[in-house]
């Protein structure tokens, strides 16, 4: 199987882009990635997106983006796995190059959420859950995560307060990232006084939606020996409905996809220099760290309390703000994570740079853990 | 690159399935394909679907279907390219096996349209067009195709009447297919008196929507030397908006993807024994035949008039009813086409069997020609 390298990256800032259409967001990021790679033609374009059919009345984003990028005639299609859409597009890009059929593939994650009237966005995001057995109860997506967080606190004896370090770290890191939606640090008092959205989840435990696009230009590693390399890539699934799981506090698909990625890379959690995880909610960051082997069951919260997750810590997470502060343009998020990991390994993360970063992991989650895609990237030895 | 074989097929009838949910439709077809192949575990599931996020409030069909098929933990994602979604899922299945990473892949196309209230389906289908430059004018999808058909009639001097053979052939063939939505032949008089939907398109020039699912089980050809083989596969794109095309009467993406598939298979149009084309509207069947080299520009209509498209003709099309009579469950259609082509090559098409069929072509179209996916299948020599 052909190894794959990331030759170019491109992004738009995460904002409320009232004046930019979804096609233009995608084109901006895609063109930037092509320019970064100095590539003018690609063989295929895979677009990750969750809600454009509902919110923008626009489907078939693959062909649309190919046209507006001037890549007339190329193969192009959209992937959807709720908030895991963008890393799913990455998976397809990797398989396409690994097949030998493609030499240059553009993967783009794009989402535009702020144009929707009233509660349409909440309704659109809820489609990540099980419509017939969860949504029918009237529970929102944040409501589902609140149930999980409450159960975790009950089971392992934590208070809401204990989750604060995850929000504080994300906001402190986001403050250094010019593309982040929120660029100011918060303190413990602000966290403690955070308005409750769905008890026990406060505003500071929930990531904000946003508009944005991120893109990577992929080529066979043989063609780009000095580019950041994908050394592990795996996707795994679990039940959509949380109540169908044996253990609602264990992200089985995170464990499986991470173990598979570790195996491919020939490494373990101790070798990861930074981890761009899917902190859609503080509780998801905690569960992800546990399932991926960075903490024992029920101990993930302590990685925050110990400072392990900070930029200088044992396993820095959300180094450029994470979903919490960079923002969570749902179907684009997985490629923002991969792009940020690439910048870190290039030594191009600016103020957010993790010194000497050589191996980075990313994890993108669709729904409440139903689709989980894990990647491991590596800087080639000089 | 690994060659791929189709080891199993499964489908539901196309109907108004009021009593079957979208997950159950997909599971029914998927399980049937696995049973047909005598395979109990797959490495990945790719689901083609267009509208479930809007009409069923259900996204993330990949993980959902994997769960309900008992394929816990496997990689699974949904592809969307409007009405070209299912053949796009097929493309990804082929690339995944070609990569060497997967040994058995299930591709499923599924759509459930009849559960939507009022005009929601028309609105959902319209998202295949360009939202900002076509939809904004208030034109429906059938309206766009009516403009193309009118232009064709004007340009080449045909009457509506001349398109009748396409509807007559589809309905006659659909009558032999127990899985077709419409199972009765029509005659010229019925066609001529057909109610106009969007002038000049009558009810008999437009395919009906429906609910249904079709699935294929793919494996490396080396593992299944006697199974039907995929010898050509290509996808191409064009502008979403018809007015952006140099020539609105030429399906450039059909020409490109067909030529690429011919090249891969080492054959030409003269070698195709049957062609399951995308007759969403009579005019699209005509344009597809021209772009794929079966007729000169402006002459596609004559293949109907000459009887070339009939079961005993030079290039039989829509042999099991096509979109017109089998029905058009949009995001599932591409896999119904591939399934029917497989049955023909197996000699298992029942009353619809084309004698001695050895090479079959399928073509699935998203939007008004924006995403076009062409496949060529071959029966291996005994």
Image (cartoon, coloured by chain):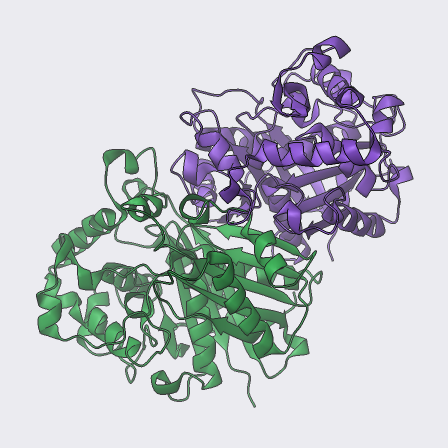
Chain colours: A green, B purple
Number of numbered discs visible in the structure rendering: 0
Question: Residue A358: x and y, percent?
Answer: 46, 83
Residues B14 and A158: in front is B14
**Which residue sits at x=59%, y=63%?**
A94
Residue A340, relative to residue A353: is it above or below?
above
**Which residue sits at x=68%, y=55%?**
B98
Tell me if residue B360 can be seen: no
Snapshot quadrant of residue B320: top right
Q: Quadrant of the N terminus of chain A?
A: bottom right
Tell me if residue A260 can be seen: yes
Question: Residue A17: x and y, percent?
Answer: 38, 63
Question: Residue A88: x and y, percent?
Answer: 49, 56
Q: Quadrant of the C terminus of chain A?
A: bottom right
**Which residue sits at x=88%, y=45%?**
B267
**Which residue sits at x=59%, y=60%?**
A68
Snapshot quadrant of residue A70: bottom right
Residues B266 and B218: in front is B266
Residue A268, relative to residue B116: is it above or below?
below
Question: Residue B211: x and y, percent?
Answer: 52, 26
Residues B241 and B103: in front is B241
């Amino acid at each position: 199987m052909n190894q794959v390298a990331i030759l170019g990256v491109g992004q738009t800032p995460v904002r409320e882009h009232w004046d930019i259409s979804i096609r233009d967001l995608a084109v901006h990021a895609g063109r930037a990635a092509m320019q970064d790679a100095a590539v003018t033609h690609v063989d295929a374009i895979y677009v990750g997106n969750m809600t454009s059919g509902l919110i923008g009345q626009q489907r078939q984003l693959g062909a649309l983006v190919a046209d507006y990028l001037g890549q007339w005639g190329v193969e192009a299609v959209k992937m959807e796995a709720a908030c895991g859409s963008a890393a799913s597009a990455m998976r397809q890009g990797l398989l396409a190059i690994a097949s030998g059929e493609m030499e240059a593939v553009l993967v783009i994650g794009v989402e535009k959420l702020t144009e929707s009237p009233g509660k349409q966005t909440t309704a659109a995001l809820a489609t990540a859950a099980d419509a017939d057995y969860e949504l029918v109860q009237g529970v929102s997506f944040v409501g589902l995560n609140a149930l999980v967080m409450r159960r975790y606190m009950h089971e392992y004896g934590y208070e809401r307060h204990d989750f604060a370090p995850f929000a504080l770290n994300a906001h402190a890191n986001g403050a250094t990232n010019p593309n982040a939606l929120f660029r100011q640090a918060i303190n413990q008092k602000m966290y403690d006084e955070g308005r409750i959205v769905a008890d026990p989840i406060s505003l500071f435990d929930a990531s904000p939606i946003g508009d944005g696009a991120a893109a990577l230009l992929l080529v066979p590693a043989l063609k780009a020996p000095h580019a950041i390399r994908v050394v592990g890539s795996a996707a795994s699934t679990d039940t959509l409905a949380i109540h169908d799981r044996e253990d609602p506090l264990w992200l089985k698909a995170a464990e499986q996809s991470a173990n598979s990625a570790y195996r491919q890379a020939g490494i373990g959690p101790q070798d990861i220099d930074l981890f761009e995880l899917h902190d859609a909610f503080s509780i998801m960051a905690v569960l992800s760290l546990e399932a991926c082997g960075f903490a024992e069951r029920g101990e993930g919260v302590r990685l925050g309390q110990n400072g392990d997750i900070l930029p200088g810590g044992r396993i820095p997470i959300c180094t450029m703000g994470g979903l919490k502060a960079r923002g969570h343009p749902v179907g684009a998020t997985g490629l923002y994570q991969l792009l940020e990991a690439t910048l870190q390994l290039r030594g191009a993360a600016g103020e957010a740079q993790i010194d000497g970063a050589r191996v980075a992991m990313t994890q993108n989650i669709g729904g409440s853990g139903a689709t989980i895609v894990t990647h491991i990237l590596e800087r080639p030895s000089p």
